[in-house]
Amino acid sequence: MTERDLLWIIPLMILAIALILLLIILSKVEGREESPARLTVAVYDYETIRFRTYSDAHTVLDELFDQLESHGKVTVSDLYFYSGVRAFPRSVYKNYGWTCLDGVEITTDQDGWMLDLPRVQSLNKKEKRL
């Protein structure tokens, strides 16, 4: 296999991984007749973020509390940013989040540490909570 062949394989592998992730996300949406709110919740898959250590999870939680204190809200985009998760389009993830983080806990399972966050809500005044 030549170096030129490898230059084609890597982008194809990245594309294949992206398609697999898209299929996983789409498979979580049950039926097309559901309300847009249900479909939106499937897109905000923040509950699957896992941290390697308790300390990593605690650092992100501290950042979220700092963000809440300084801006009065925390967006899903903020959570992804502080967690190191790349999510596109970023503008969509800024419309949903939290205005209160009371009761947030750091929990664990076999895959790592996670934040047990309240249900995401619309941060736009016109929309209802998801």
Image: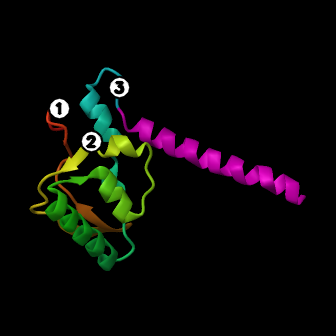
Label 3 amino acid? Gly
- Quadrant where the N terminus lies? bottom right
Location of the C terminus (image quadrant): top left
Query: Crowding near pointer 1: few (<14 within 10 Å), some, many (20+)?
Result: few
Sequence-wise, which precedes: disc 3 or disc 1?
A: 3
Residue depicted at 19% across the width and 37% down the height:
124
At a point 35% along the width and 25% down the height, the residue shown is 31
Q: Which residue is mark 2?
A: 95
Q: CA distance from mark 3 to mark 2?
A: 24 Å
Examine the structure image and report whether residue 22 is included in the region drawn in magenta.
yes
Question: Callout 3 environment at 10 Å: few (<14), some (14 to 19), or many (20+)?
Answer: few
Decide which of 71, 57 is in the foreground and name it.
71
Question: Taking 24 as reference, is 60 above or below it?
Answer: below
User: As shown in the figure, which amino acid type bears the numbered disc 2?
Assistant: Asn
Residue under label 1: 127
Asked whether 123 or 17 is in front, the reply is: 123
Q: Which residue is mark 3?
A: 31
Q: Which residues are magenta?
A: 1-29
